[in-house]
Structure formats: C-alpha cells, structure tokens
C-alpha cells in the first residue's frame, strides 16, 4: 500500500553547504548519463525559446542547449542560491549568452501569454505548493504548438528501486533529501486526477521504475 504523501518545502534548496552538496550530486548524475536531456529531445523540445522551471544547478538545461542550435533557455527557480550557482555553471559551459536565470514561483509565472516554444522541468514538481495552478501557467505561457515535459520521482516506486537510488546518491549527505522528495512525490493515479482539472487534461502520462512523465503540446 502506498504511503500518504508528506509535502516537502516549497522554498527550494537554500544555503551554501546544501547547495554545494546538491550541485555535487547533480554533477555526478550528469557524468553518469542520468540527466534527462534525451527525453526532452524525444518529446519534441528541440528549438526556440524554452522555459525551465526549477533549474537548480542548471545541468539539464545546459546539456539541452549543447544538443540544440539557435536556442535560448530561460530558467525560473525560487532559490537565489541556485540562481547564482546556475549562472556560474552556465559560464563554465560557455553558454551564458544563451541563458537567463530568474527568480519566481511556478504557479505565477512572470511571463506573458504565449512566450515560449516549450516548457520543461525535472525533479521539482513534488515541491510545488499549487501544482494545478502551475499546470495552468505552463499552458498559458506556451505558444500554440508549443511542447511541455514534466518529470519527477514517484512515491509508489518499488522498495528495491528506492534502495538502489539511496545507495547511488553522492554525496551521502543528500540521501535524507532523497527520502523526503520521494515521500512528497505523486503517483500516476494522483497526477491523472489533478491533470483532469486543468488545460493539461489531454497530456500524456507515463511512469517508469523510479518516476513519472507528463508530456504533450498546446
């Protein structure tokens, strides 16, 4: 039986030590090929001006920029510490000119209607305080024909997979955070009910051993 959801903070990752440890973890995932860039490309996010919600250290968006041409990435995160880190990482990638990292909340996106060719996010949905509002905002800021991709952990993952992820996390100081993230994550059944109340009601919804994906177009 799936345990009841335990909400996590909606204030993002803050503090120099925690941010540095999170950067190390994400850097490790990137180096092991566990960043979801191929999934973005598969779902048609390949061009134009794109919004990334919850960019964190920025590796997903930066890897996406490396594999696309004439693209621009606008990032939105709630954490000023992550903003500074992402800007630093973009500079290290040589991609500062193609990135803008801003602060804000996903349920009140500070952009005009129809601004983006695509919107994507990975690993942040479990922190959203108003996910249905965020779904509506994603639809609003997309251009007609724009694509979206939302992925996160799933709370009902197999215990063996939970253990595998726990042991895979480096540095080990981030392991408690993995536990709270999984406890705050949604199941496919919960997401299906939530999406049905929004303009993303026709979205594709898929799950794998550790996570869920929401995808589609406007």
Image: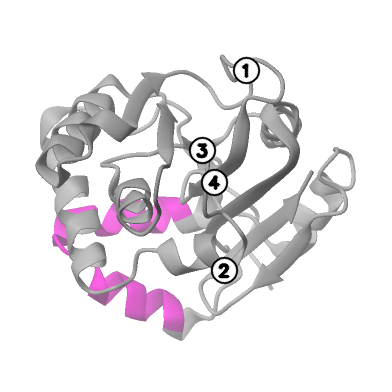
Front position in the image: 154 or 55: 55
Closer to the chain start, of discs 3 and 4, is 3
Residues at discs 2 and 4 in contact (Cβ within 8 Å): no
Q: Residue at x 77, y 62 (%)?
A: 204
The x and y percentages for residue 148 are 65, 48
Residue 18 visible in image: no
Residue carrying label 1 = 108
In the picture, residue 190 is in which quadrant?
Answer: bottom right
The x and y percentages for residue 39 are 51, 66
Residue carrying label 2 = 42
Residue carrying label 3 = 50
Q: Is residue 205 left or right of residue 193?
A: left
- Disc 2 and disc 4: Cα gap in Å? 13 Å
- Disc 2 and disc 1: Cα gap in Å? 28 Å
Q: Nearer the viewer, mark 2 or mark 4?
A: 2
Is the magenta region chiefly helix, strand or loop? helix
């Amino acid at each position: 039986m799936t345990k009841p959801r335990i909400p996590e903070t909606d204030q993002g990752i803050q503090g120099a030590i925690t941010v540095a440890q999170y950067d190390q973890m994400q850097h490790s995932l990137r180096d092991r090929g566990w960043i979801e860039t191929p999934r973005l490309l598969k779902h048609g996010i390949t061009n134009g001006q794109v919004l990334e919600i919850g960019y964190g250290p920025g590796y997903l968006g930066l890897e996406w920029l490396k594999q696309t041409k004439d693209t621009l990435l606008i990032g939105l995160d709630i954490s000023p510490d992550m903003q500074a880190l992402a800007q630093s990482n973009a500079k290290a990638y040589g991609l500062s000119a193609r990135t803008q990292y801003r602060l804000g909340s996903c349920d009140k996106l500070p952009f005009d209607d129809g601004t983006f060719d695509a919107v994507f996010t990975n690993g942040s949905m479990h922190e959203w305080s108003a996910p249905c509002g965020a779904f509506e905002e994603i639809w609003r800021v997309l251009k007609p024909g724009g694509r979206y991709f939302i992925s996160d952990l799933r709370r009902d993952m197999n215990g063996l997979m939970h253990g595998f992820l726990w042991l895979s996390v480096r540095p080990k100081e981030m392991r408690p955070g993995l536990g709270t993230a999984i406890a705050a994550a949604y199941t496919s059944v919960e997401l299906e009910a939530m999406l049905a109340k929004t303009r993303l009601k026709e979205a594709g919804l898929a799950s794998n051993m550790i996570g869920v994906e929401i995808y589609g177009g406007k």
